[in-house]
Amino acid sequence: MTDTPAINPHEETLDFKSAIVKDCYSYWRGKVIGDRLPSRSDIDPVDIPKLMPHAVILDVRREPELDFRYRLIGNLCCGTSFQRPHGLVVFGD
């Protein structure tokens, strides 16, 4: 684990079955500063090329109302779940 404080009180008992999920969580967790969760600008795809085919990044818009849009969806996610969802609204019409 990292030296950052636990976000999840059960974090020490996490048992990842997938190496991809474990690597992704470790990278993301390493970007946590204090109690601030990582933002998009904290994530550098160059650091994680093996994880990018599995990545899903959402834009969060708060105005005029809460809205989520797909910014990036890795090729492996698109191949199994979606067809070109980049820019589409996550929830809604």
Image (cartoon, rainbow, N blue to C red):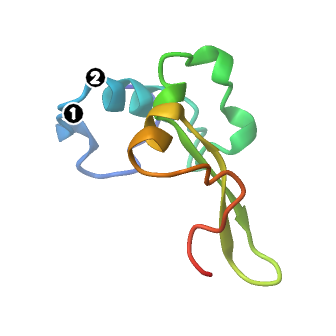
Q: Are circles 2 and 1 on residues that touch, CB within 8 Å?
A: yes
In the figure, is residue 34 to the left or right of 11?
Answer: right
**Vertical arrangement, residue 62 with respect to residue 32, above or below:** below
Q: Give the quadrant of residue 11.
A: top left
Q: Quadrant of the C terminus?
A: bottom right
Q: Position of residue 83 (x, y in %)?
A: 54, 51
> Gap between marks 2 and 1, in whole Å?
7 Å
| Residue receiving disc 1 | 16
Mark 2 = which residue?
Answer: 19
Tell me which residue sits at (50%, 28%) in the image.
53
Q: Residue at x 33, y 51 (%)?
A: 8
In which quadrant is the N terminus drawn? top left
Q: Is mark 1 on a helix, strand or loop?
A: loop
**Which label number is shown at residue 78?**
none
Horizontal side of 71 relative to 20 (left or right) equals: right
The residue sitting at 58% across, 48% down in the picture is 37
Q: Nearer the viewer, residue 87 or 13?
A: 87
